[in-house]
Image (spheres, helix red, strand yellow):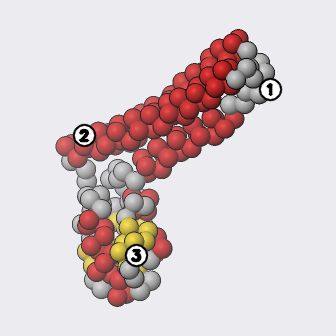
Amino acid sequence: MSDVIDLSAAERRMGGAVESVKSNFATIRTGRANPSLLDRVEVALYGSKMPLRSVANIGVPEARLLTVTPFDPNSAKEIERAIRDANIGLNPQNDGKIIRLPIPELTEERRRELIRMARGMAEEGRVSVRNVRRDEMRDLHELRREGEISEDDERRAEAELQALTNRYVERVDAALSDKEAELSEV
């Protein structure tokens, strides 16, 4: 194959798509306390939206309890509102200093809903991987059109790119399978 064709950038971008899916999966609660459940929570304070982690400490004192301790006790009400508005299925209990978030047992209906959400996130990841493939294919066609690579080199690179795409789609599917198993366990 020609030295002109380098798929490492495509591989990096596909790896980024898989990591994005995995970090999105971490924000889906599974019945156990995990601080990453609050990663998507944005708090409106001081005239802007900030991640919860930048305005409070998050702790896990028990297996089924998260605690949020605001750096500024006056921001507790806003933090509580942000957690409620994030629609993550947690009901904050604010005592003025610490916000407690008991993690309830997941109902069968909620498990199915979370699995559906995880499948949607996985599909977004697959689409991102395929978009990287599409972009790289377009670049290969452009190189071929400009005469920088031969038709054989283009075909070989396309085959390599498809194999790379298949590998990364399989990684997304494996992460989804793990998350579904985690959500299904009672």
- The mark that comes first in sequence, 3 or 1, is 1
* 3D distance between C-alphas at marks 3 and 1: 48 Å
Q: Position of residue 43 (x, y in %)?
A: 36, 72
Residue beneath label 3, please? Answer: 48
Callout 3 crowding tier (Cα within 10 Å): few <14, some 14–19, many ≥20: few
Q: Position of residue 83 (x, y in %)?
A: 30, 67
Residue beneath label 2, please? Answer: 112
- The mark that comes first in sequence, 3 or 2, is 3
The amino acid beneath tag 3 is Ser
Image marks 3 and 1: residues in contact by CB distance under 8 Å: no
- Which dot, 3 or 2, sits closer to the camera? 3
87 or 143, nearer to the observer = 143
Left or right for 116, reference 160: left
* 3D distance between C-alphas at marks 3 and 2: 35 Å
Q: Name the quadrant containing residue 183.
A: top left
SS for callout 3: strand
- Which dot, 1 or 2, sits closer to the camera? 1
Left or right for 186, reference 179: left
